Amino acid sequence: MMFLSTGRNRALAAVALASSMTLVVAGCSSSGAGAGGGEGEDRVLNVFAGSQTPITANFNPYSPTALHASSGAIYETLYYYNKGAAGDPTPLLGESFAFDDTGSELTVTLKSGVTWSDGEPFTADDVVFTFEQPFASQEWITSVEAVDETTVKFVFDGPQYTNEFTVLGSTYIVPEHIWSTIEDTTAYADAEPVGTGPYIVDNVSTSAYTIVANPEYREEGKPAVKKVRYLGIDSNQSAEDLIRTGKIDWVSMFSPEPESITADGRMGYLPLYSTATVIYTCANAEMGCEGPQTDVAVRQAIDAALDRSSINEKAFAGVGGAASPTFALPGRDDQWVAPGMPSQSPQQSDVEAAQAILEEAGYAPDADGVYAKDGQRVEMTLVSVDGWNDYNSAAKLIAEQVSAAGIQVTATTVSQSEFADARQSGEFQLIIGGVSGTSVADPFQIYHDWFTTGTTAPVGEEVPLGAWNFSRYSDPEVDAAVEAASVTDDSATKLEAYGVIQEKIVEDLPYIPLILSASQTFYDTEHFTGWPTEDDLYAFPAPFTPTAAGLILSTLEPVD
Protein backbone atom coordinates (compact mmCIF):
# COMPACT_ATOMS: atom_id res chain seq x y z
CA MET A 1 0.00 0.00 0.00
CA MET A 2 1.10 3.62 -0.40
CA PHE A 3 2.73 5.09 2.68
CA LEU A 4 0.88 8.38 3.34
CA SER A 5 3.07 10.91 5.09
CA THR A 6 0.80 13.89 5.69
CA GLY A 7 -1.96 14.22 8.26
CA ARG A 8 -4.42 15.27 5.56
CA ASN A 9 -3.70 12.18 3.45
CA ARG A 10 -4.02 9.93 6.47
CA ALA A 11 -7.38 11.52 7.30
CA LEU A 12 -8.65 11.12 3.73
CA ALA A 13 -7.51 7.49 3.68
CA ALA A 14 -9.28 6.82 6.96
CA VAL A 15 -12.51 8.38 5.71
CA ALA A 16 -12.36 6.40 2.47
CA LEU A 17 -11.69 3.16 4.32
CA ALA A 18 -14.40 3.84 6.86
CA SER A 19 -16.84 4.40 3.99
CA SER A 20 -15.83 1.17 2.25
CA MET A 21 -16.05 -0.81 5.48
CA THR A 22 -19.47 0.71 6.17
CA LEU A 23 -20.61 -0.81 2.89
CA VAL A 24 -19.16 -4.16 3.94
CA VAL A 25 -20.96 -4.00 7.28
CA ALA A 26 -24.24 -2.86 5.76
CA GLY A 27 -24.06 -5.36 2.91
CA CYS A 28 -23.68 -8.28 5.28
CA SER A 29 -26.12 -7.21 7.99
CA SER A 30 -29.26 -9.15 8.62
CA SER A 31 -31.61 -6.21 9.10
CA GLY A 32 -29.62 -3.06 8.57
CA ALA A 33 -30.58 -1.78 12.01
CA GLY A 34 -27.50 -0.29 13.60
CA ALA A 35 -23.85 -0.94 12.82
CA GLY A 36 -24.17 -4.53 13.93
CA GLY A 37 -27.25 -5.17 11.84
CA GLY A 38 -30.19 -6.06 14.08
CA GLU A 39 -30.97 -5.72 17.75
CA GLY A 40 -30.88 -8.11 20.66
CA GLU A 41 -29.96 -11.65 19.66
CA ASP A 42 -30.06 -10.68 15.96
CA ARG A 43 -27.32 -8.10 16.38
CA VAL A 44 -24.01 -8.94 14.67
CA LEU A 45 -20.82 -8.59 16.70
CA ASN A 46 -18.14 -6.86 14.60
CA VAL A 47 -14.51 -7.72 15.37
CA PHE A 48 -11.24 -6.25 14.09
CA ALA A 49 -9.62 -9.20 12.28
CA GLY A 50 -6.21 -7.55 12.01
CA SER A 51 -4.45 -5.95 9.08
CA GLN A 52 -3.82 -9.12 7.09
CA THR A 53 -5.67 -8.12 3.93
CA PRO A 54 -6.92 -9.29 1.53
CA ILE A 55 -8.46 -12.03 3.66
CA THR A 56 -7.90 -15.61 2.48
CA ALA A 57 -9.97 -18.53 3.76
CA ASN A 58 -7.49 -20.45 5.92
CA PHE A 59 -8.91 -22.06 9.05
CA ASN A 60 -6.15 -24.61 9.69
CA PRO A 61 -5.40 -23.81 13.36
CA TYR A 62 -1.77 -24.87 12.86
CA SER A 63 -1.10 -22.59 9.92
CA PRO A 64 0.92 -19.40 10.58
CA THR A 65 -1.60 -17.47 8.45
CA ALA A 66 -4.77 -18.97 9.93
CA LEU A 67 -7.66 -16.59 10.52
CA HIS A 68 -8.27 -15.70 14.16
CA ALA A 69 -11.57 -17.56 14.48
CA SER A 70 -9.80 -20.85 13.79
CA SER A 71 -8.28 -21.13 17.27
CA GLY A 72 -11.08 -21.34 19.78
CA ALA A 73 -14.26 -20.35 17.97
CA ILE A 74 -14.02 -23.23 15.47
CA TYR A 75 -11.40 -25.64 16.82
CA GLU A 76 -10.92 -26.35 20.51
CA THR A 77 -8.19 -27.59 22.79
CA LEU A 78 -8.83 -29.98 25.66
CA TYR A 79 -8.53 -27.16 28.22
CA TYR A 80 -8.17 -23.37 28.30
CA TYR A 81 -5.27 -21.90 30.31
CA ASN A 82 -5.82 -18.25 31.20
CA LYS A 83 -2.65 -16.20 30.87
CA GLY A 84 -4.47 -13.20 32.29
CA ALA A 85 -4.99 -14.68 35.74
CA ALA A 86 -3.79 -17.54 37.91
CA GLY A 87 -6.09 -20.48 38.50
CA ASP A 88 -7.10 -23.91 37.30
CA PRO A 89 -7.58 -24.48 33.56
CA THR A 90 -11.12 -24.34 32.14
CA PRO A 91 -12.41 -27.65 30.71
CA LEU A 92 -13.31 -27.53 27.01
CA LEU A 93 -13.19 -30.94 25.32
CA GLY A 94 -11.65 -32.41 28.45
CA GLU A 95 -13.56 -33.32 31.61
CA SER A 96 -10.67 -34.22 33.95
CA PHE A 97 -6.99 -35.21 33.82
CA ALA A 98 -4.36 -36.70 36.10
CA PHE A 99 -0.66 -37.57 35.97
CA ASP A 100 0.52 -40.84 37.44
CA ASP A 101 2.97 -40.83 40.37
CA THR A 102 6.01 -40.61 38.07
CA GLY A 103 4.74 -37.82 35.81
CA SER A 104 5.37 -40.00 32.77
CA GLU A 105 1.72 -40.86 32.08
CA LEU A 106 -1.24 -38.52 31.71
CA THR A 107 -4.82 -39.77 31.56
CA VAL A 108 -7.50 -37.44 30.19
CA THR A 109 -11.23 -38.05 30.46
CA LEU A 110 -13.17 -36.35 27.64
CA LYS A 111 -16.62 -34.84 27.78
CA SER A 112 -19.27 -37.22 26.53
CA GLY A 113 -21.88 -36.39 23.92
CA VAL A 114 -19.72 -33.88 22.02
CA THR A 115 -20.18 -33.77 18.24
CA TRP A 116 -18.34 -32.21 15.34
CA SER A 117 -20.15 -29.43 13.49
CA ASP A 118 -21.16 -31.91 10.77
CA GLY A 119 -22.94 -34.06 13.38
CA GLU A 120 -20.30 -36.81 13.62
CA PRO A 121 -19.42 -37.88 17.19
CA PHE A 122 -16.22 -36.61 18.78
CA THR A 123 -14.25 -39.46 20.39
CA ALA A 124 -10.86 -40.30 21.86
CA ASP A 125 -9.79 -41.51 18.39
CA ASP A 126 -9.85 -37.89 17.19
CA VAL A 127 -7.43 -36.92 19.96
CA VAL A 128 -5.09 -39.79 19.12
CA PHE A 129 -5.20 -38.91 15.42
CA THR A 130 -4.41 -35.25 16.14
CA PHE A 131 -1.34 -36.07 18.21
CA GLU A 132 -0.07 -38.35 15.45
CA GLN A 133 0.09 -35.42 13.01
CA PRO A 134 3.40 -33.60 12.34
CA PHE A 135 2.09 -30.33 13.76
CA ALA A 136 1.12 -31.88 17.10
CA SER A 137 3.52 -34.78 17.63
CA GLN A 138 6.27 -34.31 20.21
CA GLU A 139 9.44 -36.37 20.51
CA TRP A 140 8.83 -36.81 24.24
CA ILE A 141 5.38 -38.36 23.68
CA THR A 142 6.01 -42.10 23.42
CA SER A 143 2.42 -43.10 22.69
CA VAL A 144 -1.17 -41.87 22.74
CA GLU A 145 -3.86 -44.48 23.31
CA ALA A 146 -7.66 -44.39 23.20
CA VAL A 147 -8.57 -46.41 26.29
CA ASP A 148 -12.24 -46.07 25.40
CA GLU A 149 -14.39 -43.50 23.57
CA THR A 150 -13.93 -40.86 26.27
CA THR A 151 -10.52 -41.70 27.76
CA VAL A 152 -7.07 -40.97 26.35
CA LYS A 153 -3.75 -42.04 27.89
CA PHE A 154 -0.52 -40.24 27.04
CA VAL A 155 2.76 -42.01 27.75
CA PHE A 156 5.93 -39.90 27.88
CA ASP A 157 9.62 -40.79 27.79
CA GLY A 158 9.93 -39.44 31.34
CA PRO A 159 8.26 -36.93 33.66
CA GLN A 160 6.56 -34.17 31.67
CA TYR A 161 4.79 -32.05 34.27
CA THR A 162 5.95 -28.81 32.68
CA ASN A 163 4.50 -29.80 29.30
CA GLU A 164 0.96 -30.06 30.67
CA PHE A 165 -0.06 -26.94 28.75
CA THR A 166 1.43 -28.23 25.48
CA VAL A 167 -0.75 -31.33 25.61
CA LEU A 168 -3.91 -29.94 27.12
CA GLY A 169 -3.93 -26.25 26.26
CA SER A 170 -2.17 -25.59 22.96
CA THR A 171 -3.11 -28.55 20.75
CA TYR A 172 -6.27 -28.06 18.70
CA ILE A 173 -8.13 -31.30 18.12
CA VAL A 174 -9.08 -31.96 14.49
CA PRO A 175 -11.58 -34.51 13.09
CA GLU A 176 -10.06 -37.80 11.99
CA HIS A 177 -12.93 -38.50 9.57
CA ILE A 178 -12.06 -35.31 7.63
CA TRP A 179 -8.33 -34.84 8.09
CA SER A 180 -7.36 -38.47 7.50
CA THR A 181 -8.23 -37.89 3.83
CA ILE A 182 -5.83 -34.91 3.56
CA GLU A 183 -2.45 -35.75 2.02
CA ASP A 184 -0.53 -32.84 3.55
CA THR A 185 -2.19 -31.61 6.75
CA THR A 186 0.48 -28.97 7.35
CA ALA A 187 -0.28 -27.23 4.03
CA TYR A 188 -4.05 -27.75 4.25
CA ALA A 189 -5.95 -24.42 4.11
CA ASP A 190 -9.15 -25.94 5.56
CA ALA A 191 -11.46 -23.44 3.85
CA GLU A 192 -14.59 -25.27 5.05
CA PRO A 193 -13.63 -26.35 8.57
CA VAL A 194 -15.46 -28.92 10.68
CA GLY A 195 -14.78 -28.23 14.35
CA THR A 196 -16.18 -28.78 17.82
CA GLY A 197 -16.17 -25.07 18.71
CA PRO A 198 -19.15 -22.79 19.32
CA TYR A 199 -19.09 -21.35 15.77
CA ILE A 200 -18.97 -22.45 12.14
CA VAL A 201 -17.90 -20.51 9.04
CA ASP A 202 -20.67 -18.67 7.23
CA ASN A 203 -18.97 -16.55 4.56
CA VAL A 204 -15.49 -15.36 3.54
CA SER A 205 -14.63 -12.39 1.30
CA THR A 206 -11.39 -10.51 0.73
CA SER A 207 -12.41 -7.82 3.24
CA ALA A 208 -14.36 -9.76 5.89
CA TYR A 209 -15.50 -13.15 7.07
CA THR A 210 -18.42 -14.22 9.23
CA ILE A 211 -19.02 -17.08 11.60
CA VAL A 212 -22.39 -18.17 13.01
CA ALA A 213 -23.45 -20.18 16.03
CA ASN A 214 -22.79 -23.90 15.68
CA PRO A 215 -26.17 -25.69 15.96
CA GLU A 216 -24.38 -28.88 17.04
CA TYR A 217 -22.58 -27.22 19.96
CA ARG A 218 -23.14 -28.64 23.42
CA GLU A 219 -25.70 -26.92 25.63
CA GLU A 220 -23.07 -25.84 28.12
CA GLY A 221 -21.57 -22.72 26.53
CA LYS A 222 -24.01 -22.55 23.60
CA PRO A 223 -23.46 -19.05 22.17
CA ALA A 224 -26.13 -16.39 22.56
CA VAL A 225 -24.44 -14.14 19.99
CA LYS A 226 -25.56 -15.78 16.77
CA LYS A 227 -23.32 -14.04 14.23
CA VAL A 228 -19.82 -12.59 14.39
CA ARG A 229 -18.17 -10.62 11.58
CA TYR A 230 -14.39 -10.21 11.37
CA LEU A 231 -13.33 -7.11 9.42
CA GLY A 232 -9.90 -6.87 7.78
CA ILE A 233 -8.58 -3.31 8.17
CA ASP A 234 -5.21 -2.07 7.06
CA SER A 235 -4.14 -0.01 10.09
CA ASN A 236 -4.79 0.72 13.76
CA GLN A 237 -5.82 4.28 12.93
CA SER A 238 -8.45 3.07 10.47
CA ALA A 239 -9.74 0.63 13.10
CA GLU A 240 -9.94 3.44 15.64
CA ASP A 241 -11.97 5.55 13.22
CA LEU A 242 -14.43 2.67 12.80
CA ILE A 243 -14.72 2.24 16.56
CA ARG A 244 -15.66 5.88 16.93
CA THR A 245 -18.40 5.53 14.31
CA GLY A 246 -19.81 2.38 15.91
CA LYS A 247 -18.67 -0.03 13.18
CA ILE A 248 -16.45 -2.20 15.44
CA ASP A 249 -17.51 -3.81 18.71
CA TRP A 250 -14.37 -5.68 19.82
CA VAL A 251 -10.73 -4.89 19.09
CA SER A 252 -7.27 -5.12 20.58
CA MET A 253 -4.93 -2.47 19.22
CA PHE A 254 -2.63 0.30 20.27
CA SER A 255 -4.21 3.68 20.93
CA PRO A 256 -2.25 6.57 22.43
CA GLU A 257 -5.47 8.05 23.88
CA PRO A 258 -7.72 5.18 24.99
CA GLU A 259 -9.85 7.47 27.14
CA SER A 260 -11.02 9.32 24.04
CA ILE A 261 -12.40 6.05 22.64
CA THR A 262 -14.33 5.22 25.81
CA ALA A 263 -15.55 8.78 26.48
CA ASP A 264 -19.07 8.27 25.10
CA GLY A 265 -19.70 5.23 27.34
CA ARG A 266 -20.28 2.67 24.57
CA MET A 267 -16.87 1.00 24.73
CA GLY A 268 -15.25 -0.60 27.74
CA TYR A 269 -11.46 -0.79 28.05
CA LEU A 270 -9.06 -3.28 29.62
CA PRO A 271 -5.24 -3.06 29.30
CA LEU A 272 -3.18 -6.15 30.19
CA TYR A 273 0.57 -6.72 29.93
CA SER A 274 1.56 -10.05 28.42
CA THR A 275 3.66 -9.72 25.26
CA ALA A 276 7.24 -8.56 24.94
CA THR A 277 7.75 -6.39 21.86
CA VAL A 278 11.20 -7.30 20.57
CA ILE A 279 13.60 -7.10 17.67
CA TYR A 280 13.74 -10.56 16.10
CA THR A 281 17.25 -11.16 14.79
CA CYS A 282 18.17 -13.87 12.31
CA ALA A 283 21.01 -14.81 14.62
CA ASN A 284 22.50 -18.12 13.51
CA ALA A 285 24.99 -18.08 10.62
CA GLU A 286 25.33 -21.86 10.81
CA MET A 287 21.65 -22.13 9.86
CA GLY A 288 22.04 -19.71 6.96
CA CYS A 289 21.40 -16.29 8.51
CA GLU A 290 23.32 -13.52 6.79
CA GLY A 291 24.33 -10.09 8.04
CA PRO A 292 26.14 -8.37 10.90
CA GLN A 293 23.39 -9.34 13.34
CA THR A 294 24.70 -12.92 13.32
CA ASP A 295 27.57 -11.63 15.51
CA VAL A 296 26.55 -11.61 19.17
CA ALA A 297 28.64 -8.47 19.69
CA VAL A 298 26.46 -6.56 17.22
CA ARG A 299 23.29 -7.72 18.95
CA GLN A 300 24.73 -6.70 22.33
CA ALA A 301 25.72 -3.30 20.94
CA ILE A 302 22.21 -2.69 19.59
CA ASP A 303 20.80 -3.67 22.98
CA ALA A 304 23.11 -1.21 24.77
CA ALA A 305 22.42 1.64 22.34
CA LEU A 306 18.62 1.56 22.75
CA ASP A 307 16.83 4.22 24.77
CA ARG A 308 13.82 2.14 25.67
CA SER A 309 12.28 4.82 27.83
CA SER A 310 12.20 7.18 24.83
CA ILE A 311 10.83 4.45 22.53
CA ASN A 312 8.04 3.77 25.01
CA GLU A 313 7.12 7.45 25.35
CA LYS A 314 7.37 8.43 21.68
CA ALA A 315 6.16 5.30 19.87
CA PHE A 316 3.86 3.73 22.47
CA ALA A 317 2.55 6.86 24.27
CA GLY A 318 4.15 5.67 27.50
CA VAL A 319 1.71 2.79 27.95
CA GLY A 320 4.36 0.05 27.70
CA GLY A 321 6.15 -1.60 30.59
CA ALA A 322 9.73 -2.69 31.12
CA ALA A 323 10.39 -6.13 29.59
CA SER A 324 12.82 -8.65 31.01
CA PRO A 325 15.54 -10.20 28.81
CA THR A 326 14.81 -13.45 30.71
CA PHE A 327 11.29 -13.38 29.18
CA ALA A 328 9.74 -14.02 32.58
CA LEU A 329 6.68 -11.77 32.93
CA PRO A 330 7.54 -9.08 35.51
CA GLY A 331 5.34 -9.31 38.56
CA ARG A 332 3.70 -12.60 37.67
CA ASP A 333 6.81 -14.72 37.05
CA ASP A 334 9.32 -13.14 39.45
CA GLN A 335 9.87 -16.44 41.23
CA TRP A 336 11.35 -17.85 38.01
CA VAL A 337 14.05 -15.19 37.56
CA ALA A 338 17.28 -16.87 38.63
CA PRO A 339 19.64 -15.15 41.09
CA GLY A 340 21.86 -12.62 39.34
CA MET A 341 19.61 -12.33 36.28
CA PRO A 342 18.19 -8.90 35.32
CA SER A 343 14.51 -8.30 36.00
CA GLN A 344 14.36 -5.81 33.12
CA SER A 345 16.38 -4.56 30.16
CA PRO A 346 18.30 -1.25 30.51
CA GLN A 347 15.92 1.66 29.94
CA GLN A 348 18.46 4.32 28.88
CA SER A 349 20.97 4.30 26.03
CA ASP A 350 24.66 3.71 26.73
CA VAL A 351 26.41 4.63 23.48
CA GLU A 352 29.89 4.31 24.95
CA ALA A 353 29.16 0.78 26.15
CA ALA A 354 27.81 -0.15 22.71
CA GLN A 355 30.94 1.15 20.99
CA ALA A 356 33.19 -0.59 23.52
CA ILE A 357 31.44 -3.91 22.80
CA LEU A 358 32.05 -3.49 19.07
CA GLU A 359 35.66 -2.43 19.46
CA GLU A 360 36.45 -5.33 21.79
CA ALA A 361 35.05 -7.64 19.10
CA GLY A 362 37.42 -6.18 16.49
CA TYR A 363 35.22 -3.54 14.85
CA ALA A 364 36.41 -0.02 14.06
CA PRO A 365 34.58 3.03 12.68
CA ASP A 366 35.08 3.83 8.99
CA ALA A 367 35.22 7.28 7.42
CA ASP A 368 31.45 7.64 7.80
CA GLY A 369 31.55 6.68 11.46
CA VAL A 370 29.90 3.29 10.81
CA TYR A 371 31.65 0.36 12.49
CA ALA A 372 33.06 -2.36 10.26
CA LYS A 373 35.16 -5.51 10.47
CA ASP A 374 36.81 -7.50 7.70
CA GLY A 375 35.25 -5.17 5.14
CA GLN A 376 31.69 -5.69 6.40
CA ARG A 377 29.93 -2.61 7.75
CA VAL A 378 27.47 -2.92 10.60
CA GLU A 379 24.43 -2.03 8.52
CA MET A 380 21.13 -3.89 8.54
CA THR A 381 17.49 -3.62 7.49
CA LEU A 382 14.77 -3.47 10.17
CA VAL A 383 11.30 -4.52 9.02
CA SER A 384 7.91 -3.63 10.49
CA VAL A 385 4.37 -4.07 9.16
CA ASP A 386 2.45 -1.53 7.09
CA GLY A 387 -0.20 0.11 9.25
CA TRP A 388 1.30 -0.94 12.60
CA ASN A 389 1.91 2.69 13.44
CA ASP A 390 3.45 2.12 16.86
CA TYR A 391 5.92 -0.45 15.48
CA ASN A 392 6.72 1.78 12.49
CA SER A 393 7.49 4.70 14.81
CA ALA A 394 9.59 2.46 17.05
CA ALA A 395 11.60 1.24 14.05
CA LYS A 396 12.50 4.81 13.06
CA LEU A 397 13.53 5.62 16.63
CA ILE A 398 15.68 2.50 16.80
CA ALA A 399 17.45 3.48 13.59
CA GLU A 400 18.15 6.95 14.99
CA GLN A 401 19.35 5.71 18.37
CA VAL A 402 21.77 3.03 17.17
CA SER A 403 23.26 5.38 14.59
CA ALA A 404 24.81 7.32 17.50
CA ALA A 405 26.80 4.17 18.28
CA GLY A 406 28.01 3.74 14.69
CA ILE A 407 25.40 1.15 13.71
CA GLN A 408 23.44 1.78 10.52
CA VAL A 409 19.87 0.48 10.45
CA THR A 410 17.39 1.16 7.65
CA ALA A 411 13.75 0.96 8.73
CA THR A 412 11.32 -0.34 6.12
CA THR A 413 7.73 -1.61 6.05
CA VAL A 414 6.12 -4.64 4.40
CA SER A 415 2.66 -6.22 4.29
CA GLN A 416 1.61 -8.52 7.12
CA SER A 417 1.82 -11.56 4.84
CA GLU A 418 5.37 -10.58 3.78
CA PHE A 419 6.26 -10.16 7.45
CA ALA A 420 4.88 -13.64 8.24
CA ASP A 421 6.70 -15.21 5.30
CA ALA A 422 10.02 -13.58 6.20
CA ARG A 423 10.07 -14.71 9.81
CA GLN A 424 8.93 -18.21 8.88
CA SER A 425 11.67 -18.60 6.24
CA GLY A 426 14.40 -16.71 8.10
CA GLU A 427 15.00 -14.41 5.15
CA PHE A 428 15.43 -11.23 7.16
CA GLN A 429 18.00 -9.47 9.32
CA LEU A 430 15.92 -7.59 11.91
CA ILE A 431 12.13 -7.55 12.43
CA ILE A 432 9.99 -5.88 15.08
CA GLY A 433 7.52 -8.40 16.45
CA GLY A 434 6.17 -9.90 19.64
CA VAL A 435 6.99 -12.81 21.91
CA SER A 436 3.61 -13.81 23.28
CA GLY A 437 3.35 -14.37 26.99
CA THR A 438 2.71 -17.83 28.35
CA SER A 439 -0.72 -19.04 29.38
CA VAL A 440 0.57 -20.12 32.79
CA ALA A 441 2.71 -18.28 35.35
CA ASP A 442 5.90 -19.89 34.10
CA PRO A 443 8.17 -18.91 31.16
CA PHE A 444 8.87 -22.55 30.21
CA GLN A 445 6.77 -22.48 27.04
CA ILE A 446 8.70 -19.47 25.72
CA TYR A 447 12.01 -21.18 26.41
CA HIS A 448 10.85 -24.33 24.63
CA ASP A 449 9.06 -22.77 21.66
CA TRP A 450 11.34 -19.79 20.95
CA PHE A 451 14.84 -20.93 21.93
CA THR A 452 15.32 -24.66 21.34
CA THR A 453 16.92 -26.29 18.31
CA GLY A 454 13.93 -28.54 17.68
CA THR A 455 11.64 -25.55 17.17
CA THR A 456 13.51 -23.96 14.27
CA ALA A 457 14.78 -24.76 10.77
CA PRO A 458 17.56 -23.62 8.41
CA VAL A 459 17.00 -20.39 6.50
CA GLY A 460 14.84 -21.10 3.46
CA GLU A 461 12.82 -23.70 5.35
CA GLU A 462 9.77 -22.82 7.42
CA VAL A 463 9.82 -23.01 11.19
CA PRO A 464 7.74 -26.06 12.23
CA LEU A 465 4.04 -25.37 12.76
CA GLY A 466 3.34 -24.61 16.39
CA ALA A 467 6.95 -23.47 16.98
CA TRP A 468 8.28 -19.91 17.07
CA ASN A 469 12.08 -19.95 16.93
CA PHE A 470 12.32 -17.42 14.11
CA SER A 471 15.84 -16.34 15.12
CA ARG A 472 17.20 -19.80 14.24
CA TYR A 473 18.80 -19.84 17.70
CA SER A 474 20.48 -23.07 18.75
CA ASP A 475 22.53 -23.82 21.86
CA PRO A 476 23.04 -27.34 23.27
CA GLU A 477 23.16 -26.08 26.86
CA VAL A 478 19.81 -24.34 26.44
CA ASP A 479 18.34 -27.48 24.84
CA ALA A 480 19.55 -29.59 27.76
CA ALA A 481 18.27 -27.15 30.37
CA VAL A 482 14.83 -26.96 28.74
CA GLU A 483 14.74 -30.75 28.76
CA ALA A 484 15.73 -30.82 32.44
CA ALA A 485 13.00 -28.31 33.32
CA SER A 486 10.37 -30.28 31.43
CA VAL A 487 10.75 -33.41 33.53
CA THR A 488 10.49 -32.00 37.04
CA ASP A 489 7.81 -30.61 39.29
CA ASP A 490 10.40 -29.50 41.85
CA SER A 491 10.65 -25.70 41.88
CA ALA A 492 14.29 -25.55 42.95
CA THR A 493 15.38 -27.95 40.22
CA LYS A 494 13.41 -26.03 37.63
CA LEU A 495 14.83 -22.67 38.74
CA GLU A 496 18.35 -24.07 38.44
CA ALA A 497 17.62 -25.10 34.84
CA TYR A 498 16.09 -21.69 34.13
CA GLY A 499 19.27 -20.06 35.41
CA VAL A 500 21.25 -21.82 32.67
CA ILE A 501 18.73 -20.76 30.00
CA GLN A 502 18.53 -17.17 31.20
CA GLU A 503 22.30 -16.68 31.40
CA LYS A 504 22.58 -17.83 27.78
CA ILE A 505 19.70 -15.86 26.25
CA VAL A 506 20.51 -12.66 28.17
CA GLU A 507 24.05 -12.90 26.79
CA ASP A 508 23.19 -14.02 23.25
CA LEU A 509 20.10 -11.81 22.66
CA PRO A 510 18.58 -13.62 19.66
CA TYR A 511 15.50 -11.52 20.50
CA ILE A 512 16.31 -8.01 21.74
CA PRO A 513 13.55 -6.80 24.11
CA LEU A 514 12.08 -3.34 23.58
CA ILE A 515 9.05 -2.95 25.86
CA LEU A 516 6.38 -5.01 27.54
CA SER A 517 3.29 -4.31 25.46
CA ALA A 518 -0.05 -3.59 27.02
CA SER A 519 -2.76 -5.43 25.14
CA GLN A 520 -5.35 -2.65 24.91
CA THR A 521 -8.74 -4.22 24.42
CA PHE A 522 -11.89 -2.22 23.65
CA TYR A 523 -15.34 -3.83 23.75
CA ASP A 524 -18.94 -2.74 23.26
CA THR A 525 -20.70 -2.77 26.64
CA GLU A 526 -23.82 -1.02 25.33
CA HIS A 527 -24.97 -3.90 23.12
CA PHE A 528 -23.19 -6.92 24.66
CA THR A 529 -22.60 -8.17 28.21
CA GLY A 530 -20.38 -10.86 29.67
CA TRP A 531 -16.95 -9.41 28.79
CA PRO A 532 -13.89 -10.23 30.93
CA THR A 533 -13.23 -7.48 33.47
CA GLU A 534 -10.63 -6.72 36.11
CA ASP A 535 -12.97 -8.26 38.69
CA ASP A 536 -13.82 -11.30 36.55
CA LEU A 537 -10.88 -11.97 34.24
CA TYR A 538 -12.12 -15.41 33.17
CA ALA A 539 -10.22 -15.18 29.86
CA PHE A 540 -7.58 -12.98 28.26
CA PRO A 541 -9.73 -10.37 26.49
CA ALA A 542 -7.92 -9.82 23.16
CA PRO A 543 -9.96 -11.20 20.20
CA PHE A 544 -6.84 -12.70 18.59
CA THR A 545 -5.88 -14.69 21.71
CA PRO A 546 -5.96 -18.41 20.86
CA THR A 547 -8.75 -20.38 22.57
CA ALA A 548 -9.75 -17.41 24.76
CA ALA A 549 -11.72 -15.77 21.95
CA GLY A 550 -13.97 -18.81 21.54
CA LEU A 551 -14.64 -18.91 25.28
CA ILE A 552 -15.49 -15.21 25.35
CA LEU A 553 -17.78 -15.40 22.30
CA SER A 554 -19.70 -18.27 23.86
CA THR A 555 -20.06 -16.29 27.11
CA LEU A 556 -21.30 -13.00 25.66
CA GLU A 557 -24.98 -12.12 25.57
CA PRO A 558 -26.63 -9.42 23.42
CA VAL A 559 -28.51 -6.68 25.23
CA ASP A 560 -32.23 -6.77 24.43
Image (tube, rainbow, N blue to C red):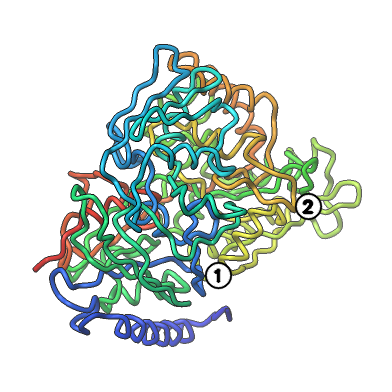
Residue depicted at 72% across the width and 51% down the height:
461
Closer to the camera, 70 or 448?
70
Q: Is residue 359 above or below residue 212?
A: above
Could you say where residue 333 lies in the image, as x and y percent from the top left?
40, 30
419 lies left or right of 161: right
Q: In this view, does 453 lie above or below 30?
A: above
Q: Which quarter shows the N terminus?
A: bottom right
| Number of marks drawn | 2
Q: Which quarter shows the C terminus?
A: bottom left
Residue depicted at 49% across the width and 41% down the height:
129
Would you identify the image quadrant in which residue 438 lies? top left
Q: Which residue lies furthest to the right in this view?
A: 374
Closer to the camera, 272 or 97?
97
Residue kind at label 2, given as amino acid type: Val
Number of other residues with Cα within 10 Å of mark 1, as a class: few under 14, some 14 to 19, many 20 or more: many
Residue depicted at 35% across the width and 86% down the height:
23
Going from the N terminus, do you reach mark 2 or mark 1 first? Answer: 2
Is residue 473 visible in the rendered image? The answer is yes
**Residue at the spot of label 1:** 386
Could you say where residue 263 lies in the image, as x and y percent from the top left?
20, 68
Is residue 239 visible in the rendered image? The answer is no
Residue kind at label 1, given as amino acid type: Asp
Q: What element carries label 1?
A: loop
Whether label 2 touches label 1, CB < 8 Å: no
**Residue at the spot of label 2:** 378
Could you say where residue 41 lies in the image, as x and y percent from the top left?
15, 68
Could you say where residue 130 lies in the image, as x and y percent from the top left?
49, 42
Q: Is mark 2 on a helix, strand or loop?
A: loop
Q: Is residue 46 above or below residue 98?
A: below
